[in-house]
Amino acid sequence: MSQNLLRPEVLITIVVACLITFFVTRWGMKRKKHATIAEKSEPIKAPEPTTDVLTVFEQSLAILQSYKQHLNQYGYPYFKETTPFVLQQLQAEADSLVTEQARENQKAQTLLLDNIAQLQRFMEQEVTDSKKLELEVSNHVNKIIITWRKLIKEFSNQ
């Protein structure tokens, strides 16, 4: 009996069966992981109107950091599925900033709206290579996070 199990064709069949099982299981796990993306997105919160630029930037920064983390974790399917919600939340944050009070608030709102416009352009862009687009979005978000952290430090020092 053990001589039959050691024949090359039997060993090859066992290896092929194990590989097929591994790849089917892996595909199923990835599919399940992508299916839970929609469940992990947060509901849109309408912030209170404020003149405090620091608060608006901190909230927007928190949104972008969460977006970046999930984008790195889930990739293009997350981008495609949840970017409209992120844009709505960022727009709500930008709209909550009262700009009539101070000139710096107008500059801050312009920065917020420029970021929203750039993310919108990424969404409307023709997708030929999803990995490339995912990388471009991730780079943009990283740059915005760095810029906004500097701005938060400047505003908190004033």
Image: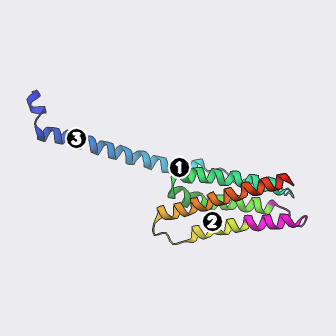
Of label 1 and label 2, which has the lower sequence position?
A: 1
| SS type, badge 3 | helix
Q: Quadrant of the N terminus?
A: top left
Assess whether residue 104 is covered by the magenta stretch: yes
Whole-percent x, y for residue 151 in the image: 76, 57
Q: Most prominent secondary structure in the magenta stretch?
A: helix
Q: Position of residue 70 (x, y in %)?
A: 57, 50
Q: Residue at x 24, y 42 (%)?
A: 17
In the drawing, does residue 79 fall left or right of residue 17? Answer: right
Q: Earlier in the sequence, mark 2 or mark 3?
A: 3
The residue that appears at 52% across and 47% down in the rendered structure is: 36
Residue at position x 82%, y 61% in the image: 97
Q: Residue at x 70, y 68 (%)?
A: 114
Residue 11, quarter of the rendered image: top left
In the rendered view, tell whether residue 125 sits above or below residue 157: below
- In the rendering, which numbered label is found on residue 15? 3
Residues 71 and 32: in front is: 71
The magenta-colored residue range is: 96-112
- Residue linked to disc 2: 119
Q: Secondary structure at mark 2?
A: helix
Q: Splitting the image into 4 quarters, where does residue 71 fall? A: bottom right
Q: CA distance from mark 1 to mark 2?
A: 18 Å
SS at circle 1: helix
Q: CA distance from mark 1 to mark 3?
A: 31 Å
